[in-house]
């Protein structure tokens, strides 16, 4: 997240300005440099003892002109395996990502690992773990919230789970989708940006070992799983009633596929019908389609972000999605009924994709050559077709 002294649309200028020509979806954004906005306040995060957020949305000032845009940036999967583990040796190793993802008003990704040095490998193919200082590195990169609702959060069994919970409890960044019980795991992290309250929920629908062995329940710790969507829908409805914008980050899909599967599309449709404003996801390790599903912006797969490349060039395909939200439109829907919200235009007005490539040497994503960048952007646009999403919101 940018500091509170920065101008409101700097993030859009950074990501769109760096992208190749045409890297902003229709309709075109306003010129970030000419759309001066009041400095955005630093988002506040509040989580009560139940881990439900308690930040009170700030009322828009009658004397300060509200910004014309609030920006939210999303990236995909992060772990610290193999040679990527050496990043932990340098507290500033990820600071290079600050202008790439940390410049937005709110930034988020999927931390796909256990946070432990103990425990026993669970009966699955891959096992990821990292020390707690990874959270400090991600904070230095400008991240504001992480989801740990994924299939690697409990790779090292009960001891690893205990350590991960302890790390999350003292994390410098809020973590969603994982907790000591279901109430905590499904609780949103809540931010207030320029008077707009934003609730972020993490969940996984990946039908694998972790979601069956370590689901968060009313009495046991684990990940927020939504094979049965009851708890997720309850969390969404509670958030929608309290906050201006609702974001759900899902862990879903089929490995190494560039088109969403039927379960992904069904869940996205379900969340759109519940008035969720933004649905993003990861797991496939591929860039999947992004666009509007009615008034809801959906990004099915954001690929790898900080990753140990193991499958050649396509595993390196990465990027940052930056969404521009109309704060006035979001505030106007505050407290609105679901039918009213569903009839309203999308609060997400523009989407920008900055293609990146994961580095061979250190696993950090960087801009590729101009030709490669254009090819990656074109692929992102093409993937919208099989995702059955629109290039612009409905009027």
Image: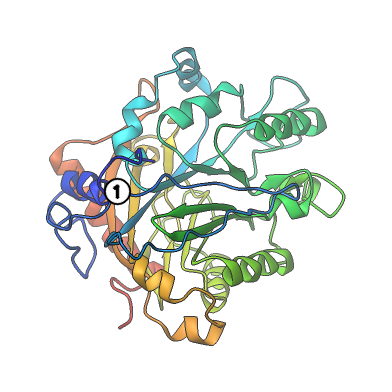
**What residue sits right under mark 1 in the picture?**
39
Q: Nearer the viewer, residue 94 or 67?
A: 67
Question: Which of the pair 255/352 is nearer the observer?
Answer: 352
Image coordinates for residue 198, horizontal then vertical, percent: 49, 58
What secondary structure is found at the residue carrying circle 1?
loop
Report the residue that reaches farthest toward the top.
89
Q: In the displayed structure, would residue 306 be above or below residue 34?
A: above
The extreme front residue here reads 63
Residue, x 22% and y 56% (percent of image)?
A: 378
Left/right placement of residue 175 relative to residue 42 reads right
The quarter in which the N terminus is drawn is top left
What residue appears at the point 16 percent right and 36 percent down from the top-left corner? 369
In this rendering, position of residue 373 left or right of residue 242: left
Whether residue 388 is visible, yes or no, is no
Q: Quadrant of residue 27?
A: bottom left
Q: Quadrant of the C terminus?
A: bottom left
> What residue do we see at 66% from left, 38% from top?
153
């Amino acid at each position: 997240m940018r500091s509170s002294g920065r101008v409101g649309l700097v993030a859009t200028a950074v990501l769109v300005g760096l992208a190749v020509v045409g890297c902003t979806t229709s309709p075109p954004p306003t010129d970030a440099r000419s759309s001066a906005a009041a400095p955005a306040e630093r988002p506040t995060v509040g989580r009560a003892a139940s881990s439900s957020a308690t930040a009170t949305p700030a009322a828009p000032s009658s004397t300060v002109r509200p910004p014309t845009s609030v920006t939210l940036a999303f990236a995909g999967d992060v772990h610290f395996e193999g040679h990527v583990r050496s990043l932990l040796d340098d507290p500033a190793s990820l600071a290079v990502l600050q202008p790439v993802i940390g410049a937005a008003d709110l930034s988020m990704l999927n931390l796909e690992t256990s946070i432990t040095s103990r425990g026993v490998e669970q009966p699955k193919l891959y096992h990821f773990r990292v020390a707690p200082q990874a959270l400090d590195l991600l904070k230095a990169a400008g991240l504001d919230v992480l989801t740990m609702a994924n299939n690697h959060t409990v790779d090292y069994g009960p001891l690893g789970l205990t350590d991960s919970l302890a790390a999350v409890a003292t994390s410098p960044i809020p973590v969603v989708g994982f907790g000591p019980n279901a109430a905590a795991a499904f609780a949103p992290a809540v931010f207030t940006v320029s008077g707009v309250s934003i609730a972020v929920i993490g969940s996984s629908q990946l039908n694998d070992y972790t979601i069956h062995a370590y689901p968060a329940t009313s009495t046991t710790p684990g990940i927020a799983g939504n094979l049965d969507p009851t708890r997720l829908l309850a969390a969404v409805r509670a958030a929608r009633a309290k906050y201006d914008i609702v974001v759900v980050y899902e862990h879903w899909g089929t490995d190494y596929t560039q088109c969403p599967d039927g379960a992904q599309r069904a869940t996205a449709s379900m969340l759109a019908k519940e008035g969720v404003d933004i649905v993003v996801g990861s797991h496939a390790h591929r860039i999947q389609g992004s666009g509007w599903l009615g008034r809801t912006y959906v990004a099915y797969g954001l690929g790898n972000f900080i990753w140990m490349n193991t499958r050649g060039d396509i595993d390196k395909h990465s990027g940052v999605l930056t969404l521009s939200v109309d704060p006035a439109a979001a505030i106007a829907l505050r407290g609105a009924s679901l039918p009213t919200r569903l009839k309203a235009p999308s609060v997400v007005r523009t989407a920008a994709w900055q293609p990146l490539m994961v580095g061979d040497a250190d696993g950090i994503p960087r801009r590729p050559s101009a030709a490669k960048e254009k090819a990656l952007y074109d692929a992102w646009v093409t993937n919208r077709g099989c995702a059955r999403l629109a290039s612009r919101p409905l009027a």
